[in-house]
Structures are given as C-alpha cells and as structure tokens.
Amino acid sequence: MKIFSTHEINEIAKLTLAESNLSEQQFIEILGESLATEIITSMIPEHRLVMFAGPERCGAYTLAAAQQLIMQGYNPQVILFNIGGNRLSSQCKLMLENIRSACGDDAVNEITEMQFALPDLSTEVTAIDGIFGTERTAPLPGGYQSIVRYINDSGCRVISIDVPSGLIVDAVECMISRNIIHATITLAIGMPRVAFFMRENHELLGTWKVVPVDYSPNAIKKAPWTFRMLERADIRHFLLPRDPFESKADAGSAILFAGSYGMMGAAVLAARSALRGGCGKVTVHSPRVGYFTMQNSVPCALFDCDPGDVAITEIELKRDYQSVAIGPGLGTADETINALEAFLKLANANSRPLVLDADALNCIAIRQDMLKHIPVMSVLTPHVGEFDRLFGRQPSSYARLLRAMEVASELQVIIIIKGRYSAIVRPDGKVYINPTGSPALASAGTGDVLTGLLASFMARGMRPEFAACAAPYVHGLAGELAAQIHGTYGVTASDVIDQIGRAIKSIIE
C-alpha cells in the first residue's frame, strides 16, 4: 500500500471525482456513511455521544457522519466551531445546510462567538473529534488549543476522524502533544500516513483504522510515492514454494561471523533462524570458546573456528558463500575491529553485499572510517541506539528516518531501522514500512533472529533489497504467531524462531 502526503492524496481525490463523475458533495456524503458505520461499531452502548466539527474539510466529514447517525436513530450532540461566523469552508457550509434540512435547525449547535460553554464531558462520553484533519498544516491557534486540552483532560473516550486534531502529518517535528487530541481510536481516511508509524505519535493516535475510500486505481498508480506499507501479497512474490527436486546445494549457503566469550547465544539464535529460513547450509565462524556451544545447540550448522580463544580475530572467506552476515554477539575487541576493517575493504573491492548487525555496527561506530568501505547494497539492521551511535543522535523518529534516507543514498546501502514498524530505507529514496510484529518481540535476541533470516533469504538467491523487505515481514509475523501461544510477556527469541516455518507457510499459501 502506497503512503502519500496530503497534497498527493488531494490530487488523487480530484482525479477520482473526475473519473467517477461524482460531485464533492456526493463524495463527502458517501464518506459520511462509512464514518457513521465505523463510529457505531466502535461505540460503547451506554455512552453519550458528543461530536465536535471544525470549519474546514474534516468538519464537513463530521457533519455528514452526524447526519447519518441521526437518521439511524442516534442522538448525538453536534457542535460546529465557526468562530467569527464566516469561517466555514464551502464543503462545511454545504454539509451544515444538508443536516439542518434533513434533521432540523437544532441538530447542530453552531459556535460563532469566542465566549461559549463547552459541553460536559466525562468517562461515560464518547467524543468524536472532527475539529481539524490533515488539511491543517500549522499548529492549532490558542483558542483551539484550549478546546483540545479540555477534551484531553475530561477522561472521555475520543474517536478522531482523519487524524487527531492538531497532528500535522506531513511535518511531524516540533509538535507539543498537550495541544493535540489524544485519541482512543483514529479513523484514517482512505490510507494511513507516515506519521502513524512514528513512535512519538502512538499516544496521540491510539488504535488507528483505515476507512476505505474508492480512490481511482489509475490515479494511485500514476501518483509518485516515497513511502509504502508492505503487504502479504508483496512478500509472496519473493517467497516461492520449494522446487520438489531442490537439494541443500540449491538452497544456498550462508556464513555468520558471530559470537564471543559470554555472547554465544546470539550466534546460536542467528544460526537457528538462518536454518529455519530455508538456507541449505549454514556455517558459523566463532572463537574457540564457542565450539561446544554451537555443536551442541545447533548441530545442523557447520562450525568454522577462529584462531582467537574468546573473540573473533580473523574475518575471511575460505570458500564461496551466497551470503555473509556479521555481527550477532561479535563484541568490540580491538582485534575484532581490525579484522572487520580488513574484511570490509576486501569485500568492498569484491562488491559483495553483506548483512551487518549488532556489534558489527558498534565496531563501525567506534571506527567511523569503515563506513566508506561498506559494500554497495549491503543491509544494515540497527535499532535506534545503534543508529544514533553510527550516524548521530536524532531528536525524533521522523528525524531519524530522514537521516537514514540521506545515509542510504550517500553510502548506497539498505538500512532497516528496527522497531514496532521497522522502516526499510533503500538507496533510491524509497522507504518500506513493515506492519507485522508484536510487543512480544521486545525480547533479547530477536534482532539476531532477523539477521539469520536476512542471511538465509539472501543465500537462497533473494536480492538484498527484496530480502530486506521479506525478512522483517516474516520475522514480525513469526512474533505474532509466538505471541498467540505464549502471550506478549512470555515470548523469547527461540519461540520466534520456532514460528518462522509457519509464518513462511502462511504467506506462500
């Protein structure tokens, strides 16, 4: 699913109206029906319903929904803000005329003066926030800020239409959360926005749901895009059923440079994940201390012993592998950093894309000059802390995403910023958002599982940019399946690995 800016969606809507011969009024009325249905579905029966409509497009949507609710027997208290008496957009004026014509002049309480009494709100009220939606491109003025704070402080349940009032979806910096509605549910119009996937906005959006809009497929296809949310159909293109005559040689070989004294668990998890991902042969290169651990914990993997006793001192490819991953449990010993630097220079010269995770990234953060030696189309998988150590501390999730786009283009690499909605940032400027996952994945070792999956998929012949989308999607889905069994508190990284096969099977079938 493509994710567009407000301007782009407005252009898509215009073309949709032109192609469908719908008037803007008809479009709003159809949307009002859909919103009313969603509000009814989301309501608590004994709650009183109060609807706040603003003077612009979102207010028009809210009035259209209010009309449908009244006609279906509900009795909402509808408040329309028209401070000054001449602030209504043409859309909002039309919907106001419609609802008063159909339901009576008393159906809407139009506020035109600065001094007015707000309705009583409590925990037994559901408030519909339709004050401002995505049409708002600047922070709310002082009067509306007071209304927002009143609603937030009341303890009522809030359903926001389009977006919570005050949230600027196309410029998510420098926003003061107390001046933005804190919604329980957000009914997004047509499609989600990039702001929905930022951690800072979670408390503002609550649970968000897309209200479908029949936008023109032709308009959506033609519209330029930067962001896209991954869907199961996208991943199915990459995960093909196995050939009946496939051998382990056909399924590819991967090598993992992982593990150090006290951190062999990371190597175990990455290796087990690579095997679950369908890789034919997995080799783990670790220091001598890891020999018995690996042989006992992952007997299906080969062990390649490093000369070092407790840390990796040599990163070399003694044979040909289809994929190379470096990082889980690697440590940051000086000899390990030296070995990584020497290998990166050689790998860069050979144009071999790598998977770099965890301590491989921490080693590079210590010796920043290594960044320029990372091979083109390598996949870097930092969590927030690792990213900031590598590329500078960022003030917000959105700032971090913009910085990742700069770095990916500059270094010609793929960056996966891991999180609830992992962002896969490509060097061509495209960003894919992964929707799968669960709070259950907030457990030590799950990042190592993702590294193993990436190595596995690339070993099987998947191009790095495709593996960078498929692996997080499968990883998140496996986490969801594990949570169904163990709950979000009880899932470990090993539980996630055990569900990888089921996750892949569900996608293919």
Image (spheres, helix red, strand yellow):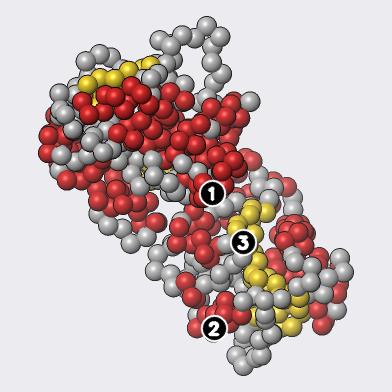
Q: Nearer the viewer, residue 298 or 383?
A: 298
What's the residue at 56%, 70% (across, down)?
182
Estimate the x, y position of residue 375 in percent, counting from the top left.
25, 30
Q: Which residue is mark 3?
A: 186
What's the residue at 64%, 53% (across, down)?
210
The kind of residue on which mark 2 rests is Ser
Crowd tier of the residue under label 3, counting other residues whose Cα lies within 10 Å: few below 14, some 14–19, many 20 or above: many
Which quadrant of the figure has residue 123?
Answer: bottom right
Image check: 319 left or right of 207?
Answer: left
What's the residue at 43%, 23% (across, down)?
275
Q: Earlier in the sequence, mark 2 or mark 1?
A: 2
Name the disc covering residue 488, or none: 1
Tag in front: 2 or 1? 1
Which quadrant of the figure has residue 393?
Answer: bottom left
Above or below, 210 relative to 109 = above
The kind of residue on which mark 1 rests is Thr
